[in-house]
Amino acid sequence: MGKKKSRFETEVIHSGYWPNEHQDSLVPPLYQTSTFTFTSAEQGERRFAGQEEGFIYSRLGNPTVKILEERMAVLEQGEAGLAFSSGMAAVSAVLVALTKTGDHILCSQGVYGCTFGLLELLKGKYGIEHDFSLMESAEALDQEILPNTACIYIETPINPTMKLVDLELVAMVANKKGIPVVVDNTFCSPYIQTPLTLGCNVVIHSATKYICGHGDVIAGLVIGEKEFIRQVSRTTQKDIGGIISPFDAWLLLRGIKTLPVRMDRHCENALRLFEFMKSHPKIESVYFPGDPEHQDYSIAKKQMKQSGGLISFTIKGSKVSAQQFMNQLQLIKIAVSLGDAETLIQHPATMTHAVVPEEERKKMGIEDNLLRLSVGLEAWEDIQEDLDQALERI
Ligand code: PLP
């Protein structure tokens, strides 16, 4: 591999890494070190002054982490990447970098529960306001972007309602006003959706999910323009300190190699299960971007390569019916998180979005009988049989 640009399936395996720079090791080595030695006091001075390339201390940069950051920048088609200790460390580093007291953030109509918590914290402590918007038209967006709007923050598909936001539309309006658009791309991964190619400015991942793919790491990533990433790296990351460990970066590098293979299987399994769920008499509604009757199906076709591995649905009945159904499952595990090999189910109203007050939750479309299924890599027939037997019992 030289500098030639390859296809996605090749870049996940090779980009950002040159064996001849690392003792010819085929696999990126794990640089499990907190600090780096200088050959002289003067060299240390030059590195701190930014006059000489080289590592200083692992909170400021680490070779294993750097490979991961460069690989993710290639995959998201951005200029640079930055890795964090969690998705929330990434979200908070970006929002703190982009805002100051008195600013305003315009958000998609629904965000992950802890992102909601962070927005409330920023409002309560630092007077940074936020509003939620459907982002359905340029006219409405024009009105909702205020003179003090510092950034637009989007999840699409939105966790857990699976509504979509037209990224090209939002970027077009925001770009004219010079307002950065930040997209949490966790639900898709760059294999399915690349917001930067649609005019958005910053991509965030909870790398805990599809990027890792094996349920054994908590991590986050940010990808964007070089200057923005440098600024976050030198301020909100360096000084707040939410950095990834070299070992977790190494595990992510291992996981990413199979991202396209895994995503194809997640998506194929989800499509099959969607067909089953859609026609089941005990299921009220199914929310899945691959559904031709989904309210945002045209947006899905435009910006997503496939429909993803997540399906949300409501059970006919109440919260109790939803919980009874979960308790009958045998193969499918009751757990938050997503993107793992194991199929997981969770109840957003009492789990991932429990921190969101009931009134806000309802506005976001999170009903008490809503469940979110992260379709795993098992044989789809086994997942379907488990869903079927649990539905039979309620
Ligand atoms: N963004 C989304 C869409 C998520 O689903 C999550 C976690 O579930 C996060 C961000 C936060 O990521 P982490 O748990 O890695 O901090």
Image (cartoon, rainbow, N blue to C red):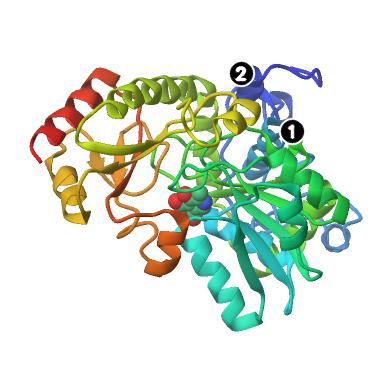
Give the vertical position of 34 relative to 382 (above or below).
Answer: below
Which of the two labelled residues, at mark 1 and mark 2, occupies the earlier sequence position?
2
In the image: residue 142, left or right of residue 296? right
Kindly report the distance in space between the C-alpha atoms of the residues bearing marks 1 and 2: 14 Å
In the image: residue 96, left or right of residue 292? right
Residue 50 visible in rendering: yes
Residue 75 at x, y = what percent?
67, 31
> Which residue is at a point 56% across and 35% down the rendered structure image?
189
Residue 85 at x, y = what percent?
54, 55
Give the vertical position of 88 relative to 216 (above or below).
Answer: below
Query: Which residue is disc 1 drawn over?
Result: 77
> Which residue is at a point 80% across and 44% down the rendered structure image?
172
Residue 375 at x, y = what percent?
35, 31
Q: Looking at this view, is 291 or 56 the one in front?
A: 291
Query: Which residue is disc 2 drawn over?
Result: 9
Q: Looking at this view, is 96 or 156 the one in front?
A: 156
> Which residue is at a point 28% across and 39% down the rendered structure image?
284
Q: Looking at this view, is 202 or 103 the one in front?
A: 103
Q: Amino acid at mark 2?
A: Glu
Give the vertical position of 97 relative to 112 (above or below).
Answer: below
* Mark 2 residue's CB less than 8 Å from ligand 1: no
In the image: residue 390, left or right of residue 302? left
Q: Quadrant of the C terminus?
A: top left
